Image (cartoon, rainbow, N blue to C red):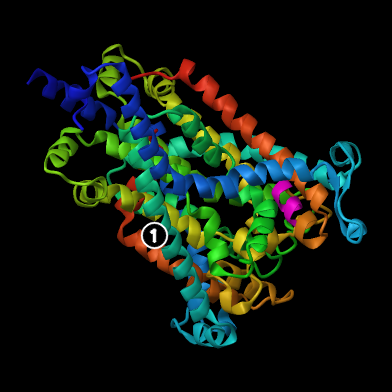
Amino acid sequence: MSQRQISVQGPQREIAKKWRVTRLAWGLLLPSLIFLAIFTFYPIGYSVYMSFFKNNMATYATGPQYIGLANYITLFTQDKVFAASFRNNLIVAVVTVPTSIALGVAMAIFANQVKVGKGAVRVSYFYPSLLPMVAVANIWLFIYTPMYGLLGYINPAWHFLTNPSTVLGALIVMLIWKQAGYVMIFYISGLQNINSELYEAARIDGANARQTFWKITWPMLKPTTLYVMIITLTNAYKMVDHLYIMTKGGPGNSSNMLLFYVYQKAFDQSNTGMASAITVVLVVILLVITCVQFFTQDKRIFYA
Amino acid sequence: MMMRLQKNRLQAASWKWTPGKVIGYAFMYLFALVCLIPLIWMVRTAFIPQEHALNLFKVAAPTLDNFVRIWNAASWSTYYINTFIIVGGVLLMQFITITMAGYAFARLEFYGKNTLFVLFLTQIMIAADVLILPNYNTISGMGLANTLLGTMMPFFASAMGTFLMRQTIKTIPFEIEEAATIDGCSLFNMIMRIYLPMLVPCYIAHGLIAASYQWNNFLWPLIVINSVSKRPLTVGLAIFAMSYETGAQWSDVCAATFLTVAPLLILFFIFQKRFIESFAYSGIK
């Protein structure tokens, strides 16, 4: 088995050996590959395929009917719920990503420096991300309940969740509360990887706290920020459990999200064709997010 | 010596209290407190006698009455068992699949390695959360609708865990393996006897992350499970909470919420450092 011995015995033996190793490696990867094939690759292809069919209650008797791109055309030109969900998802992403990152960095810097109550501070920042979204939804539903809720003590007339113009904002506050501590974790380890000599040099040059942050800390945290951006961006499209408890996407779809709309189309309305088309849109969004990040990553990373 | 002096001075300098720093510290402490409010309030409502639940300033002796009442109103013990089975089953299967796959990616040079690596990445980009409709069709096609196995199966392979495993195995010196092969150890024995003990931190890290994901998972089990006896905690909680109309019984809902979050949260409070390290570890690529 020793690699050195075989390499002197010519290229043919080398190739034969690589095939042996290949068989072994594929054997080891096979269990994972089977599950990935069934529950990740196949469903993506299946969704694309099904999105070209009309398949709902009306076609129940006749079977799915091929309609080309009609589902997509309906989604992007006529479907108001889809438009609202698409817009809401975009708003959630645009607001929660930078806010969570800003809060996460502040939390991490504080949690790294603080001397009194370090553990307690970390716990209270991080624990929300360990709670199930459903539990979080129950607690915040109670907080937002008019009259009886916690905010009801401030102003009993507040109806944040039943007012179309405030519901998304109310949910976003909750999502940031849940997510910021999770973001903090990655920044804590990011901060610990920064060479302390850089700070020393900055101090000798007489840099103030603000300059030190913008000239050293923030640029050195760039790899962490890119990683966190992928997580928070994709999360913005995946977090929907709370809708089931709090709003069901309402009032009037003002808080609906794409993934929840998939759930409604597929399991409430039995419209498989449309649900597949929305799934494909979601898959494309997630692919675009991660690919853009992966491909731009290498060029911009600062190596310490 | 010089270095140490500078370092001390640096620390002294960074600990000078400026007005900006005082305000910043006060704000961040306050913020930590604000983050705790929802938890404190939920726990208070769960333990205070029902008649005082909506009176914020009432002080009363804690009681378990709310828990006794809800424990009899829904099959919480069944929900607990189902959640434990799901978490345990998924973890067990993932530990097997990620150890095998992680070893292959870390130690073997083979045809198709890069292609397979990219295929694994797909699972990280497009999580099973999004593919609920096609996966439900697959599961029910296999006759596994309304089973715990059907709930677990889409998570039996984990690309995240595989990459974590690969990273960890790469840090173990290769010489260890050469010594074992000379002693005539089979691959299986070598992984079991030599690698496994060294991978324990990796299993803990991945285990904590995967366990909290499964414990908290909701939409997928909601779709797959349609009988009371198979519900996990999250689904049980949601359906229990939804059974109240407006003018909700907040004592009951908070007690039920407490039941759902307590085990994971208590574990976290005890092993705080371990949890945070594990989640941080998963982010290192």
Give residue B124's position: percent from left, percent from top.
Answer: 52, 40
A77 or B237: nearer the eye?
A: A77
Question: Which part of the image, by quadrant, shows the N terminus of chain B?
Answer: top left
Question: What amino acid type should be assigned to the residue bearing mark 1?
Answer: Leu
Give residue A236's position: percent from left, percent from top.
Answer: 62, 43
Label 1 sits on a secondary structure element that is helix
Whether residue A173 appears in this view of the structure is no
* Outermost residue, left side: B1
Q: Circle 1: is it few (<14), some (14-19), or many (20+) Cα within 10 Å?
A: few
Question: Which part of the image, by quadrant, shows the C terminus of chain B?
Answer: top left
**Which quadrant would residue A78 be assigned to in this image?**
top right
**Which quadrant would residue A11 be assigned to in this image?**
top left
Q: Left or right of B22: which side holds B174?
A: left
Residue that carries the numbered disc 1 in the rendered image = B92
The residue lying at 45 percent from left, 24 percent from top is A222
The prevailing secondary structure element of the residues shown in magenta is: helix
Give residue A121's position: percent from left, percent from top.
Answer: 37, 50
Chain at tag 1 = B
Q: Left or right of A273: which side holds A37?
A: left
The residue lying at 33 percent from left, 40 percent from top is B103
Residue B75 vs B253, above or below: the answer is below
Magenta stretch?
A258-263
Q: Left or right of A54: which side holds A120?
A: left
Whether residue B266 appears in this view of the structure is yes
Q: Is residue B120 magenta?
A: no
A139 or B260: nearer the eye?
A: B260
The residue lying at 60 percent from left, 52 percent from top is A174
Give residue B277's position: percent from left, percent from top.
Answer: 33, 46
